[in-house]
């Protein structure tokens, strides 16, 4: 599409002046260049080299490798969006500064805050695109890519198998002296394998009954959908007094037990956070909170908040890039690209540190995900005030 056509379409936007259209087109061209550059670099470094190695060493078919490569692209497109906005803002406003166009615009009374409106508009548009890709496109594509890779390298493996499923269930117990309730293990569910239909090799420690503890072993178990209960097959129930004395042993070929179906949900939802949409991650969090594992819970909470905060990095980078580009000393394209790399590295390093602190419990999940954005917007505002002077 020609520049004239772009300007014609932009003229239909309410409040968009000729100046806005001019700057918007200046931003759009380096943005598209950045999308191609950063996506290509991400795919090459993150996926392509590994696929080439698997083709030569593991015999991965070329057609499947190409399919996996295409499925991995949305994951890197999500990361390329904010980086491209930063590069576009730096290069566009640096070009205006180097050609003295900014001086001419300021001389007729146009403020710096007015000049960055096109960058903010483009940043908001890309923020929406990033959210759509990050929540709808990338998770499904990433899951399909990993499933295709596993199926290609392990052709004899069933389509759905999960090993070593562990589900601890905790509860609060009141203290005899009336003190604060203590969190104790109430039930421990372990299965060696889940083949998509049955749990195999089960061992369950049940401490939910006040007068007796149970240890249940079974060759297999399946969930009875009609009765909302577990069907256990070929197993043994060991009844033990809470003080440790033996009570009884019950062997069975088929036994129905009213245990929670959470272990089954965990097996079905055993995806990485990057392979789940925001809705799926929240549903999985409700299941995971029943397990009482604080580290896993905090990690997923941080990932959920990051799914929301990540798209707004585009707005942060758009403001910082525009503020830096308006400074005359950053008018060189090589300087702009160098600043872009440093800012990207610094931001994602800060994001890694804050997410680690969130998982460790030092920061709340909300603060861990949003602190880099808050600091970035603050820095962008300060730079913008300095450029306006």
Image (cartoon, rainbow, N blue to C red):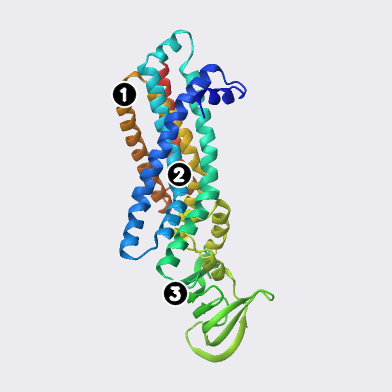
At a point 44% along the width and 49% down the height, the residue shown is 73
Residue 210 seen: no
At a point 37% along the width and 42% down the height, the residue shown is 350
Q: Where is residue 157 in the image (x, y as percent from the top left)?
A: 45, 73
* Tag 3 near tag 1, CB within 8 Å: no
The residue tagged 3 is: 156
At a point 30% along the width and 28% down the height, the residue shown is 334
Q: What is the distance, in whole Å, between disc 3 and disc 1 at their CAs?
A: 57 Å
Looking at marks 3 and 2 on the same chain, the residue that comes earlier in the sequence is marked by 2
Residue 387 left/right relative to 114: left
What element does badge 1 sit on? loop
For residue 332, which numbered disc appears in the image?
1
Foreground pick, 323 / 78: 78
| Residue 379 to residue 236: above or below | above
- Tell me where residue 325 sits by quadrant: top left
Foreground pick, 146 / 275: 146
Q: What is the distance, in whole Å, between disc 3 and disc 2 at their CAs?
A: 33 Å
Q: Residue furthest top?
A: 108
Q: What is the distance, in whole Å, between disc 2 and disc 1 at their CAs?
A: 27 Å
Q: Where is residue 387 in the image (x, y as percent from the top left)?
A: 40, 19
| Residue 27 to residue 348: above or below | above
**Quarter of the picture holding the C terminus:** top left
How would you rate the neighbour count of disc 1 (Cα within 10 Å): few for under 14, some for 14-19, many for 20 or more?
A: some
- Tell me where residue 97 sits by quadrant: top left
Looking at marks 3 and 1 on the same chain, the residue that comes earlier in the sequence is marked by 3
The residue tagged 2 is: 77
| Residue 360 to residue 60: above or below | above
């Amino acid at each position: 599409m020609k520049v004239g056509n772009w300007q014609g379409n932009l003229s239909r936007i309410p409040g968009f002046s000729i100046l806005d259209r001019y700057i918007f087109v200046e931003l759009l061209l380096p943005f598209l260049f950045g999308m191609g550059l950063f996506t290509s670099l991400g795919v090459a470094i993150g996926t392509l080299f590994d696929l080439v190695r698997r083709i030569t060493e593991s015999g991965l078919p070329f057609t499947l490798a190409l399919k996996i490569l295409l499925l991995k692209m949305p994951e890197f497109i999500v990361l390329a969006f904010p980086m491209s906005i930063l590069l576009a803002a730096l290069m566009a406003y640096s070009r205006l500064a180097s050609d003295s166009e900014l001086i001419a615009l300021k001389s007729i009374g146009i403020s710096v805050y007015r000049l960055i409106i096109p960058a903010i508009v483009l940043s908001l548009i890309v923020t929406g695109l990033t959210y759509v890709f990050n929540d709808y496109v990338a998770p499904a594509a990433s899951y399909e890519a990993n499933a295709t890779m596993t199926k290609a390298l392990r052709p004899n493996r069933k389509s759905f198998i999960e090993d070593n499923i562990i589900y601890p269930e905790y509860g609060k117990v009141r203290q005899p002296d009336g003190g604060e309730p203590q969190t104790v293990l109430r039930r421990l569910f372990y299965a060696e394998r889940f083949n998509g239909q049955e749990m195999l090799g089960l061992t369950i420690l049940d401490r939910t009954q006040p007068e007796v503890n149970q240890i249940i072993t079974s060759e297999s178990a399946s969930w009875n959908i009609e009765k909302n209960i577990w069907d256990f097959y070929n197993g043994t129930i060991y009844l033990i007094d809470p003080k440790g004395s033996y009570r009884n042993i019950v062997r069975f070929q088929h036994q129905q037990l009213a245990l929670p179906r959470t272990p089954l949900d965990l097996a079905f939802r055993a995806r990485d956070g990057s392979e789940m949409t925001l809705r799926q991650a929240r549903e999985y969090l409700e299941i995971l909170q029943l397990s009482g594992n604080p580290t896993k819970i905090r990690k997923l909470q941080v990932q959920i908040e990051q799914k929301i905060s990540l798209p707004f990095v585009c707005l942060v980078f758009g403001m910082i890039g525009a503020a830096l580009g308006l400074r005359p000393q950053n008018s060189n394209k090589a300087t702009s690209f160098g600043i872009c790399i440093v800012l990207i590295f610094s931001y994602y390093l800060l994001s890694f540190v804050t997410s680690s602190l969130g998982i460790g419990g030092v920061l709340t999940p909300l603060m861990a995900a949003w602190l880099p954005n808050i600091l970035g917007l603050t820095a962008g505002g300060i730079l913008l005030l300095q450029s306006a002077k």
